[in-house]
Image (tube, helix red, strand yellow):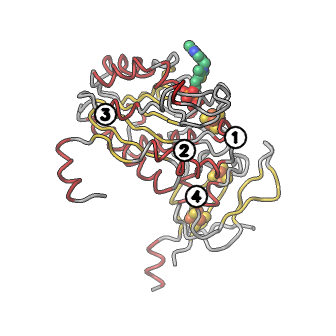
Amino acid sequence: MENKIPEEFEVVYCKPSTLTDMPMHYCPGCGHGIVNKILMEVVEELNIQDKTIGVAPVGCSVFAYNYMNIDMQEAAHGRASAVATGIKRVLPDRYVFSYQGDGDLAAIGTSETIHTVNRGENILMIFINNAIYGMTGGQMAPTTLIGQVTSTSPYGREAAAIGNPLKITDMLAQLPGAYYVSRHSIHTSNAIRKLKKAITKSFEYQKEKKGTCFIEVVSNCPSGWKMTPLESMKWIEEHMFPIYPLGDLKIPKEESKVTKENPN
Amino acid sequence: MIKGTVKIDEEICKGCELCIVACPQGSLGLSSHINTHGYRYVELIKDNCTGCINCAIVCPEPAITVYRQPKTTKSKVA
Ligand SMILES: Cc1ncc(C[n+]2csc(CCOP(=O)(O)OP(=O)(O)O)c2C)c(N)n1
Ligand code: SF4
Ligand code: SF4
Ligand code: SF4
């Protein structure tokens, strides 16, 4: 259809200026692209582009530094939160975040993750849980669901041999250093709007030096799951949410009264 | 109803179809053509877009720019 844009029309959505022009390498429909974009929308809206430093992981989002038009540092596998700790301590007036997958944050980097939150480092940690190692070809992750077929669990994950899916976010919420812990998703436009609010809130808390903000994003890996992007979004709802339910796991004490009175 | 429209960067689109199901108006569809990366890209197939931006929010690339009739024009008409 020939689409002429009437002159009087206003732009109501365009790619944020905080993303570079480089096309993303993620597979079609991958949640990484959505979260990279939403994160940069928040940085644009808060006008903190020159004050924000991100730490990229090893995993499919290893090239996040090519897309996010801010200062970025690449970390060794699993160590993003430790690197972010160092950056934040040297430059306490910057907004610092780490961005990691489940293999990075909840397997090889478990120790760094736990101790960063336990220390209450004043950073935002973004955790992309797609229940698989995407980059290396779809191996089982600590977050892989029971029965889920991956290249290293060809008959489905069995709890007896492998243990149950690691709910690392629930564990971290117990630590006193965790200030705000929340689980979100990217399966609908409304879910993405809520995720955006949570990221905005986390940067505001960081400004007030409140402690660690931790956001889990229940995401997809259409290639590793061997599904179309649309099938993967359904799979998130049907299979991931029962194990990883959405919502706040820890909210600031000052706000819990208000939230109880006006649930959003 | 507020009128809107979208512009899709067909070279950036990967044809994931997330925007198609996110659109409450059914305004979007896959083209029968492919872009230089081999993806069938998305295009506007109906003239009923309201500029709600749902499609742009779910687009990972992001390949969609959304335009809307300004509110002031609307009040002038009314
Ligand atoms: C020290 C080390 N061990 C193992 C690897 C191989 N490796 C690369 S990425 C990855 C896991 C990626 O999975 P995840 O963190 O879930 O990210 P995703 O790709 O799914 O986004 C592994 C094991 C490596 N690069 N370095
Ligand atoms: S392999 Fe999975 S996580 Fe990695 S880019 Fe592709 S869909 Fe995304
Ligand atoms: S802006 Fe809204 S109505 Fe228009 S194409 Fe996108 S989702 Fe559909
Ligand atoms: S969501 Fe974006 S990349 Fe996916 S089909 Fe729509 S325009 Fe293309």
Question: Do circles 2 and 3 both sit on a common chain?
Answer: yes
Residue indicated by mark 3: A173
**Residue A64 visible from this viewpoint:** no
Is residue A91 or residue A186 the one in the foreground?
A: A186
Do badges 4 and 3 share one subunit? no
The amino acid marked with disc number 4 is: Cys
Q: Mark 3 lies on which chain?
A: A
Using residue A53 as the reference point, say whether residue A237 is left or right of it. Answer: right
Marks 4/3: CA distance? Answer: 33 Å
**Distance in Å between CA atoms under marks 2 and 1:** 19 Å
Mark 1 lies on a secondary structure that is loop
Relative to A51, residue B45 above or below: below
* Alpha carbon separation for disc pair 2 and 3: 25 Å
The label number, if any, that marks residue A226 in the structure image: 1
The circle drawn on residue A34 is: 2
What residue is pinned by disc 4?
A: B55
Q: Quadrant of ligand 3?
A: bottom right
Q: Is mark 3 within 8 Å of ligand 1?
A: no
Left or right of residue A170: residue B49: right
Q: Name the kind of residue labelled 2 in the image.
A: Ile
